[in-house]
């Protein structure tokens, strides 16, 4: 808001005089990522969303938020700042289509036959690091592995049939 109303000297960004509602609209547009294909998403009540997150939707059983919860699924502490509302809705309704490569489940088989499955935390040319369902960290040199496979299926279920439209809007909030 300060940059929009104050401008940025010597950059070509002039200050703008806007009504409070106009300023909120501009900021919402910027945060939405300028995505013209983005569907309108209804946002519900955040307090009810938190209750659903921790209860009926069972999100808190896998996701961590601000240091609380397991590490089985991606940390959602800053998810509202890095994903658009439409992207959040897509992830809840069609998780397989929204799954980022880094969040895909990985199964490795070591040269001695041990199998480990988990969420990939990091991978480079020579190593892969996984966290398993017991929240144990595993790091492997790829030369130690006989097999490495990545799944295309999200571990997270679709909430299209699990939550009502109102509940979905609350979780997005």
Image: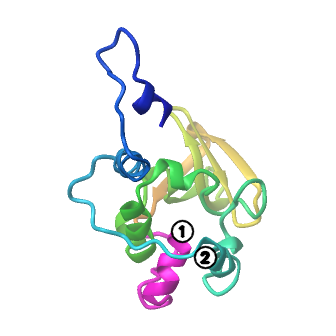
Q: Which residue is mark 1?
A: 173
Q: Is residue 171 magenta?
A: yes
User: Which residue occupies 58% across, 42% down?
Assistant: 122
Query: Residue 64, percent across and down?
Result: 70, 60
User: Which residue occupies 46% across, 58% down?
Assistant: 150
- Colour scheme shown: rainbow
Q: Is residue 155 visible?
A: no
* Viewer-closest of 41 and 69: 41
Task: Tell me the magenta residue range.
Answer: 153-173
* Viewer-closest of 154 and 165: 165
- Whether tag 2 and tag 1 are in contact, CB under 8 A, the answer is yes
The label shown at residue 14 is none
Mark 2 neighbour density, 10 Å: few (under 14) some (14–19) many (20 or more): many
Query: Residue 15, percent across and down?
Result: 36, 25
**Alpha carbon distance from label 2 to label 1:** 6 Å
Residue 87 quadrant: bottom left
Q: Is residue 170 visible?
A: yes
User: Which residue occupies 62% across, 42% down?
Assistant: 144
Left or right, 58 with reference to 12: right
User: Which residue occupies 34% across, 49% down?
Assistant: 29
Residue 97 quadrant: bottom left
Q: Main secondary structure of the magenta part?
A: loop
Q: Quadrant of the C terminus?
A: bottom right
Q: Which residue is mark 2?
A: 49
Q: Mark 2: which secondary structure?
A: helix
Residue 60 quadrant: bottom right
- Mark toward the start of the polypeptide (2 vs 1): 2
Query: Residue 99, percent across and down?
Result: 42, 61
């Amino acid at each position: 808001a300060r940059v929009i109303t104050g401008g940025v000297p010597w950059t070509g960004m002039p200050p703008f005089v806007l009504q409070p509602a106009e300023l909120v609209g501009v900021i919402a547009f910027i945060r939405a990522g300028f995505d013209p294909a983005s569907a309108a998403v209804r946002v519900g009540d955040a307090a009810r969303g938190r209750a659903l997150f921790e209860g009926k939707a069972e999100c808190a059983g896998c996701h961590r938020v601000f240091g609380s919860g397991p590490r089985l699924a991606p940390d959602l502490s800053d998810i509202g700042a890095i994903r658009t509302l439409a992207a959040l809705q897509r992830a809840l309704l069609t998780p397989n289509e929204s799954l980022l490569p880094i969040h895909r489940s990985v199964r490795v088989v070591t040269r001695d036959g041990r199998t480990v499955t988990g969420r990939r935390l990091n991978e480079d040319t020579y190593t892969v690091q996984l966290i398993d369902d017991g929240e144990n960290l595993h790091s492997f040199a790829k030369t130690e592995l006989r097999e490495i496979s990545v799944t295309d299926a999200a571990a997270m279920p679709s909430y299209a049939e699990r939550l009502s439209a109102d509940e979905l809007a609350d979780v997005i909030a």
